[in-house]
Image: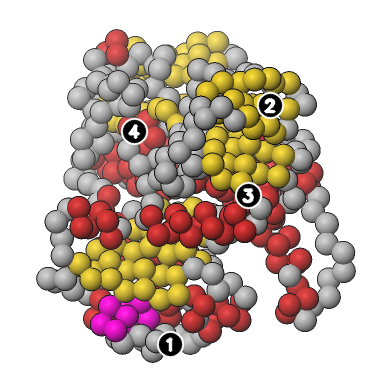
Amino acid sequence: MKKEKIAIIGSGPGGYVAAIRASQLGADVTVIEEEAIGGTCLNHGCIPTKSLLASAELFNSLKEAEEFGVCAGEIKADFAKMMERKSRVVDNLSDGIKMIFKKRGIKLINGRGALISPGRIRVVSSLGVEEVNASKILITTGSKPTALPSLDFKQPGILSSKDTLSLERLPKSILIIGGGAIGLEFACFFNALGTSVTIVEMMDQLLPNEDKRISRQMAQILKKRGIKILLKTRVKDIVSQSNEGVTCLLENGDEVSAEKLILSIGRKPNSQGMGLEDIGVHIDKRGSISVNNKMETNVTGIYAAGDVTGGMLLAHVASAEGIIAVENALGIASQIDYSTIPRCVYTFPEIASVGQTTDEALISGKKIKTGRFPFSASGKALIMDQTVGSVHLVVEERTDRIIGGQIIGPHATELIHEIALAIRSGITAKELSVTIHAHPSLSESIMEAAHSVYKKAIHIL
């Protein structure tokens, strides 16, 4: 039986996961990648940033070692070695993907792909031009950082997230434009190492898409650490810039200066120059490829997944969408459920949320009840000396089902999945509250938050 041919343009978390799944289903798979395998997530995003954050978190822990009765001596941060370790982690994971590709017979072509027709792709590389033919094509080219008219990544001292991960020395001061997840993660990393950090955010809160209560608490935490936060503030222009520093003029007339400026105001789809418009693939004004819930475009045989579709710009969403796309391409009816996707911010402390916030539930017309449990009342959090934060549950009053959850605190990005599973499975707050959790554990706090919905939490007044 002849194998179905699938070509995938882009090898990020959407593309490489889709390629492996298509191979598992028996397809003949070719992946076209212009840069490094793994895309932004592996090379310039999720993995390297979290590697650096892990180094900074360990550094913080060692500075507090005496609180645990451990005398570690003088603690120093070696920025260069942190960057080297980050690169090793990236290389190890990259090699792992290549090994899987080789074992599964997935062909990898290094070059830039553009569509000639619905079944044909032209690939331009250092070796020349070649053509790839496939009955089904999946586009997973991701996204790239957004710039501003007055702030361009080619200007001295102005960095994208990718540029920041290639710094050779630790800056004395950093100005971060944008108070979203990327901006706050960089803020936590550089602040931990002693860099002076200023965040400028145009909205009235950090993490504009997150729960207001968590946003306010995070702002207070960062301010206590000496991070300067300017909300409802825009950069009007650049006063001066050089390799030694950048000075910005704000709309209120103030000036703010730093050795380096990180621009993290969002990302835009990588959909240009691929011949999509020429063959009739619909792209909206933002450059996002339009797809249905099966990840199909309006052109038969062409699919798209991940950031390039303009949805939730999360690596795990791209991977899930990539799987959905190739399953549908190979005749397996498959759809994605966006209602239980965790959103995680790897700050100190971590932030994670899933489902609806209190405000979102009320706006949607639901009558709700809520439960909350602070980590300051958790035995395990006290043992770890990480008592800042809390678990918050949003429960539909009529059904008692959990419809949302937010966590700020230790290991929030791991704990959130219990709440995600609860929402997906239709579990009630009562059912969660009577599910016995190990003691002492951080996950007890989720059980206690469920108890608090009925004013029956054991360890709080």
Please give the label number shown on residue 227. 3
Please give the label number shown on residue 246. 2
Mark 3 vs mark 4, CA separation in Å: 31 Å
What secondary structure is marked by label 1? loop
The amino acid sitting under disc 3 is Ile
Mark 2 vs mark 1, CA separation in Å: 50 Å
Mark 2 vs mark 3, CA separation in Å: 18 Å
Please give the label number shown on residue 459. 1
Residue sitting at the far front: 253
Badge 2 or badge 1: first in the primary sequence: 2
Depth check: give the residue in front, 83 or 69. 69
Q: Position of residue 125 (x, y in %)?
A: 55, 16
Residue at 29% x, 30% y is 303
The amino acid sitting under disc 4 is Gly
The amino acid sitting under disc 2 is Val
Displayed quadrant of residue 248:
top right
Badge 1 or badge 3: first in the primary sequence: 3
Q: Which residues are magenta?
A: 447-455
Badge 3 or badge 4: first in the primary sequence: 3
**Residue behind mark 4:** 310
Q: Is the stretch drawn in magenta largely helix, strand or loop?
A: helix
Displayed quadrant of residue 254:
top right
How many other residues sit within 10 Å of disc 2, few (<14), some (14-19) or many (≥20)?
A: many
